[in-house]
Image (tube, grey):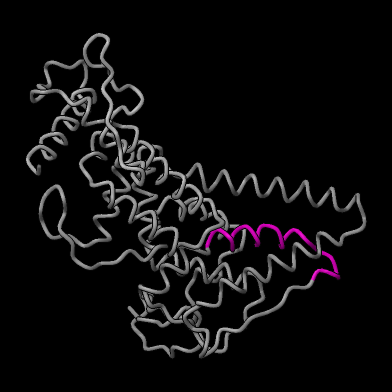
Amino acid sequence: MANLVCSKSGITFRCEHMPLAFGTSTYVHPLFHVPQKKLIALAGTWAAQRLSPTESYLLYLSLLDSTGLIQWRTHAQYVPEISDAIVANNMESLLHIIAKINLIQHPTFVLPSFAIGPETVLLDNSKYWIESWIGNYTEWYDDLRDSRKREELKEKIDHREAALQRLIKSSTPVEAYAATLADWASIAGQFPQSATVHPITNQSVALGEYWKQLIKSIANEDKLWRFPRHDLVELIDHCEDNIQHGNIYAHTLMRYLRKGLRIYDDYLGFGDASIGHAGETPFTVMPPMSTVHSINRAALIATAPEEEPKQQQYPSKLAWLKAYTKWKMNQVRTSST
């Protein structure tokens, strides 16, 4: 067995049945020899989080290389805490622009080349390379005067785009949807790994792992309510500030997180607060500067049951949890006054 260093990715890989020593400057990982069409077909596997971070990195580099627009002056450098986020944020955009440009065979369609050298080994500029290709393609397409060719190209591209979208979206099983989003967000958003105290277990846990649990809990209302609301708000703020937007995953994640916050705010039944005694409407005068959250909290407390709710008294666990949470909030308020 021989250990080889890929001259493009910098990754060490093994060659079975070859007990010889090789030089490390002229060999590349086999993925770089895979046809571009088959590389694109791996989009579904990547989207379903079935590739390891190293495999995703190799796929990203192989796709870049397949364009013929990358000059290799040295090999790239894989640094997990940097490279994984770059790949997660830019893979989809790269797949889409490749799906477009390999359909165009026209002498006026020219794209710029970029070099991987000592200053660009971390691939942090690859975002701008892809944006440049997208910009060049858009400009060329907008200037295409032949309406017939324009429509033919549009039809081909729309077909290719739809196929790629289906590949990315359909590759994620419904039951694993939240887990897939959580894993992607953790990588793309570079979730912090500093220690925090888990609000449910009271055990020390990495903040990034806690946020992944929080994302997964949105798919289950009974679990979501065990987490503090402000932690969900903090998570949303972090993702807005640290994740590159404009792709399916980022759009889906933010819509999913905001849906979770709406579920959280609606969970206790702000809209179905019951009237107290016959002819009696409970109300509370709130200060002028009260927040929506404090107003909603007061509304919940006003409709809280006087005695601790028992699960057998309610038609479902969800109904009992709503009543129990109202009662608990009222108990906390009472004990603090």
Residue 100 falls inside the magenta stretch: yes
Q: Is residue 142 left or right of residue 100?
A: right
Say which of 273 and 57 sits in front: 273
Q: Position of residue 299 (x, y in %)?
A: 28, 31
Please report the residue visible at 83 percent of the width from the left and 49 percent of the height from the top: 152
Q: Is residue 57 left or right of residue 108?
A: left
Could you tell me which residue is drawn at 56 percent across and 74 percent down? 126
* Magenta stretch holds residue 308: no
Residue 287, compared with residue 312, is above or below; it is below
Residue range (magenta) = 91-109
Residue 39 in the image: x percent, y percent? 55, 60
- Image quarter hosting the C terminus: top left
Residue 249 in picture, x, y percent from top left: 48, 52
Which of these two is toward me, 295 or 200? 295
Tell how many labels.
Answer: 0
**Quadrant the N terminus occupies:** bottom left
Foreground residue among 163 and 24: 163
The residue at the point 12 percent across, 21 percent down is: 311
Residue 219 screen position, x and y as percent: 33, 38
Which residue does the image show at 51% across and 80% down from the upper left?
Answer: 8
247 to the left or right of 327: right
Residue lying furthest top: 278
